[in-house]
Image (tube, grey):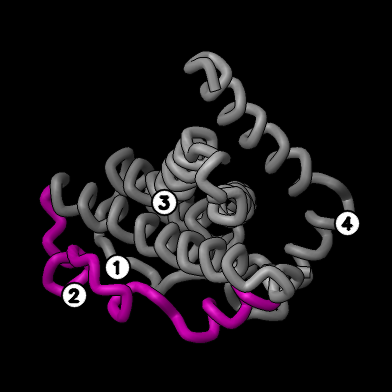
């Protein structure tokens, strides 16, 4: 259904879309910053250590974000292998979860008496999108972060299997995504991640 379901509530749609798009930027910034800290200057040289949305956002990814509630940023290049490459790759989904946590936190703190309900709802919708992004990007399917983690730290056989999956291109990714969705695997991961965030918020009294 995607974010277009909220077009009848323009403020909710705009807040959700803007916050979700910024979450894609955060995903890239976390990966670029961490790679830079580990001594890989490639993301910096390619201009990814910036808040400029044009550097990070992919037009087709933004279109899918609006239509389906799932989008993607441009891929952050890095050359780290081993545990450092693994951490950099998986920091992307962590960036999504960080964005989701902040959005839920702000939504919970907004005073409803000031008529900010629609802004709060938009942030909650964006948080849900971020959790979906984190769940999807964790799966080891090229070109997602889970696959990049295997390329960085996996065995030769695992990397070769990733190459085989990548050879199918977008069709392979879409088919695997549909299988994960309809079998409930993706939903289970998403529910687990959202449950974790909600537990943290409850511990904070929200």
Q: Residues within 10 Å of mark 2 (few under 14, many from 20)?
A: few
Could you give the CA–CA distance between mark 4 and mark 3, rounded to whole angstroms?
A: 25 Å
Image position, residue 152 (x, y; %)? 38, 51
Question: In the rendered structure, does residue 85 fall within the stretch colored magenta?
Answer: no
- Which residue is under mark 3? 92
Q: Earlier in the sequence, mark 3 or mark 2?
A: 2
Q: Residues within 10 Å of mark 1 (few under 14, many from 20)?
A: some
Segment colored magenta: 39-67
Q: Is residue 142 left or right of residue 75?
A: right
Q: Quadrant of residue 57?
A: bottom left
Q: Earlier in the sequence, mark 1 or mark 2?
A: 2
Q: Residues within 10 Å of mark 3 (few under 14, many from 20)?
A: many
* Label 2: element kind: loop
Please state, as top left, top right, bottom left or bottom right, where the C terminus lies in the image: top right
Q: Are marks 3 and 1 in contact (CB under 8 Å)?
A: no
Q: Is residue 182 left or right of residue 64?
A: right
Q: Earlier in the sequence, mark 3 or mark 1?
A: 1
Could you give the CA–CA distance between mark 4 and mark 1, rounded to whole angstroms?
A: 32 Å
Q: Earlier in the sequence, mark 4 or mark 2?
A: 2
Q: Is residue 64 left or right of residue 2?
A: left
Could you give the CA–CA distance between mark 3 and mark 2, rounded to whole angstroms?
A: 17 Å
Please state, as top left, top right, bottom left or bottom right, where the N terminus lies in the image: bottom right
Q: Earlier in the sequence, mark 4 or mark 3?
A: 3
Q: Is residue 174 left or right of residue 102?
A: right
- Which residue is under mark 1? 77
- Which residue is under mark 4? 182
Q: Residue at 52% across / 63% down in the picture?
A: 15
Could you give the CA–CA distance between mark 3 and mark 1, rounded to whole angstroms?
A: 12 Å
Q: Are marks 1 and 2 in contact (CB under 8 Å)?
A: yes
- Which residue is under mark 2? 46
Which disc is residue 155 wearing?
A: none
């Amino acid at each position: 259904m995607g974010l277009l379901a909220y077009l009848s509530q323009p403020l909710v749609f705009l807040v959700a879309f803007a916050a979700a798009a910024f979450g894609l930027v955060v995903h890239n910034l976390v990966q670029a910053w961490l790679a830079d800290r580990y001594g890989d200057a490639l993301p910096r040289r390619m201009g990814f250590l910036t808040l400029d949305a044009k550097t990070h956002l992919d037009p087709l990814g933004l279109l899918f974000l609006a239509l389906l509630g799932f989008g993607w940023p441009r891929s952050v290049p890095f050359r780290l292998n081993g545990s450092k490459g693994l951490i950099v790759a998986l920091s992307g989904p962590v960036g999504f979860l960080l964005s989701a946590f902040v959005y839920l936190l702000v939504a919970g703190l907004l005073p409803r008496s000031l008529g900010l309900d629609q802004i709060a709802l938009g942030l909650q919708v964006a948080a849900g999108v971020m959790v979906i992004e984190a769940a999807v990007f964790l799966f080891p399917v090229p070109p997602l972060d889970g696959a990049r983690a295997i390329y960085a730290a996996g065995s030769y056989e695992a990397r070769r299997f990733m190459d085989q999956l990548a050879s199918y291109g977008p069709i392979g990714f879409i088919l695997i995504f549909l299988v994960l969705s309809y079998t409930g695997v993706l939903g289970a991961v998403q529910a687990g991640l959202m449950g974790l965030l909600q537990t943290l918020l409850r511990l904070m009294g929200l």
